[in-house]
Image (cartoon, rainbow, N blue to C red):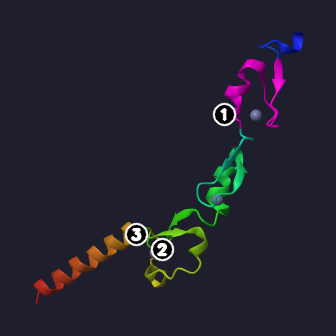
Amino acid sequence: MSNQCPNAEVWCELGCGQVFPRLERQKHSLECGKQSVVCDFCKIWITKDELTAHQQSICQEYTVTCDYCRMKQLRRGDVSVYNCTYKICTYKITPYTVHVKNNTIIIIITLIMFSTL
Ligand SMILES: [Zn+2]
Ligand SMILES: [Zn+2]
Ligand SMILES: [Zn+2]
Protein backbone atom coordinates (compact mmCIF):
# COMPACT_ATOMS: atom_id res chain seq x y z
CA MET A 1 0.00 0.00 0.00
CA SER A 2 2.61 2.57 1.03
CA ASN A 3 4.45 2.41 -2.31
CA GLN A 4 1.24 3.36 -4.14
CA CYS A 5 0.95 6.60 -2.23
CA PRO A 6 0.71 9.46 -4.76
CA ASN A 7 2.91 11.62 -2.55
CA ALA A 8 5.66 9.03 -2.17
CA GLU A 9 8.87 10.37 -3.65
CA VAL A 10 10.22 8.58 -6.69
CA TRP A 11 13.38 8.95 -8.77
CA CYS A 12 13.06 9.97 -12.38
CA GLU A 13 13.02 6.80 -14.51
CA LEU A 14 14.98 8.54 -17.27
CA GLY A 15 17.90 9.18 -14.97
CA CYS A 16 18.01 12.96 -14.71
CA GLY A 17 18.54 12.62 -10.97
CA GLN A 18 15.41 14.40 -9.86
CA VAL A 19 13.13 13.17 -7.11
CA PHE A 20 9.47 14.15 -7.11
CA PRO A 21 6.13 12.93 -5.73
CA ARG A 22 4.73 10.03 -7.73
CA LEU A 23 1.68 12.03 -8.82
CA GLU A 24 3.97 14.51 -10.62
CA ARG A 25 5.64 11.85 -12.74
CA GLN A 26 3.57 12.76 -15.81
CA LYS A 27 4.28 16.46 -15.42
CA HIS A 28 7.99 15.82 -14.90
CA SER A 29 8.29 13.62 -17.99
CA LEU A 30 7.31 16.63 -20.11
CA GLU A 31 10.04 18.86 -18.71
CA CYS A 32 12.72 16.25 -17.98
CA GLY A 33 16.09 17.01 -19.58
CA LYS A 34 16.65 13.31 -20.28
CA GLN A 35 13.51 13.08 -22.37
CA SER A 36 14.21 12.11 -25.98
CA VAL A 37 13.33 14.69 -28.59
CA VAL A 38 13.92 14.91 -32.33
CA CYS A 39 16.23 17.60 -33.72
CA ASP A 40 14.01 19.58 -36.13
CA PHE A 41 16.92 20.00 -38.52
CA CYS A 42 18.72 16.66 -38.88
CA LYS A 43 15.98 14.46 -37.37
CA ILE A 44 18.19 12.56 -34.94
CA TRP A 45 16.92 11.55 -31.53
CA ILE A 46 18.70 13.30 -28.73
CA THR A 47 18.03 14.08 -25.08
CA LYS A 48 16.39 17.43 -24.46
CA ASP A 49 19.30 18.74 -22.37
CA GLU A 50 21.75 18.10 -25.22
CA LEU A 51 19.60 19.56 -27.98
CA THR A 52 20.67 23.18 -27.57
CA ALA A 53 24.38 22.34 -27.61
CA HIS A 54 23.80 20.03 -30.57
CA GLN A 55 22.07 22.74 -32.60
CA GLN A 56 24.52 25.46 -31.60
CA SER A 57 27.66 23.64 -32.62
CA ILE A 58 27.23 20.14 -34.04
CA CYS A 59 24.12 19.81 -36.19
CA GLN A 60 25.10 19.94 -39.86
CA GLU A 61 21.55 20.70 -40.99
CA TYR A 62 21.10 23.63 -38.64
CA THR A 63 20.54 26.97 -40.35
CA VAL A 64 23.22 29.52 -39.60
CA THR A 65 23.89 32.98 -40.96
CA CYS A 66 27.02 33.53 -43.06
CA ASP A 67 29.78 34.98 -40.85
CA TYR A 68 30.94 37.28 -43.62
CA CYS A 69 27.87 38.99 -45.03
CA ARG A 70 25.54 38.26 -42.07
CA MET A 71 22.70 37.85 -44.56
CA LYS A 72 22.96 34.50 -46.32
CA GLN A 73 21.26 31.59 -44.55
CA LEU A 74 23.22 28.36 -44.85
CA ARG A 75 23.16 24.79 -43.62
CA ARG A 76 26.05 24.53 -41.16
CA GLY A 77 27.43 21.71 -43.31
CA ASP A 78 27.66 24.10 -46.28
CA VAL A 79 29.45 26.95 -44.52
CA SER A 80 32.93 25.71 -45.41
CA VAL A 81 32.12 25.38 -49.12
CA TYR A 82 29.99 28.50 -49.56
CA ASN A 83 32.07 31.13 -51.31
CA CYS A 84 30.79 34.39 -49.94
CA THR A 85 31.86 37.52 -51.82
CA TYR A 86 32.53 39.22 -48.48
CA LYS A 87 35.26 36.70 -47.73
CA ILE A 88 37.74 38.77 -49.73
CA CYS A 89 36.66 41.99 -48.07
CA THR A 90 39.25 43.49 -45.71
CA TYR A 91 36.45 44.26 -43.26
CA LYS A 92 35.51 40.61 -43.11
CA ILE A 93 35.50 40.35 -39.33
CA THR A 94 33.11 43.27 -38.93
CA PRO A 95 29.38 42.88 -39.36
CA TYR A 96 27.41 43.77 -42.44
CA THR A 97 26.23 47.09 -41.02
CA VAL A 98 29.83 48.29 -41.00
CA HIS A 99 30.15 47.41 -44.69
CA VAL A 100 27.13 49.58 -45.34
CA LYS A 101 28.52 52.40 -43.25
CA ASN A 102 31.86 52.30 -45.03
CA ASN A 103 30.18 52.29 -48.43
CA THR A 104 28.11 55.28 -47.40
CA ILE A 105 31.24 57.12 -46.25
CA ILE A 106 32.93 56.36 -49.57
CA ILE A 107 29.88 57.64 -51.45
CA ILE A 108 29.83 60.84 -49.38
CA ILE A 109 33.56 61.40 -49.95
CA THR A 110 33.07 60.83 -53.68
CA LEU A 111 30.22 63.35 -53.76
CA ILE A 112 32.28 65.94 -51.89
CA MET A 113 35.21 65.44 -54.29
CA PHE A 114 32.95 65.89 -57.30
CA SER A 115 31.20 68.91 -55.90
CA THR A 116 34.49 70.70 -55.32
CA LEU A 117 35.63 70.24 -58.91
ZN1 LIG B 1 13.77 13.40 -15.25
ZN1 LIG C 1 20.43 18.24 -35.56
ZN1 LIG D 1 28.03 35.63 -46.96
**Pointer 1: what residue?**
30
Q: Which amino acid does label 2 sit on?
A: Tyr
**Dot in front, 1 or 3:** 1
Say which mark, if any, is on residue 87: none
- Residue at image coords 69%, 57%: 44
- Tell me, yes or no, whether the two marked residues, 2 and 3, touch with CB atoms within 8 Å: no
**Pointer 2: what residue?**
68
Residue placed most toward the observer, 68 or 75: 75
**Pointer 3: what residue?**
96
Quadrant where the image shows the N terminus? top right
- Residue at image coords 79%, 37%: 16
Going by the picture, which residue comes out furthest to the top? 1
| Left or right side of 73 for 11 | right
Residue placed most toward the observer, 67 or 97: 67
Q: In the displayed structure, would residue 19 be above or below residue 78?
A: above
Q: Which percent across, then down, holds residue 65?
A: 49, 66
Q: Does the residue labelled 2 lie within 8 Å of ligand 3?
A: yes
Crowdedness near tag 2: few (<14), some (14–19) or many (≥20) residues, C-alpha within 10 Å: many
Q: Which percent across, then down, holds residue 102?
A: 33, 74
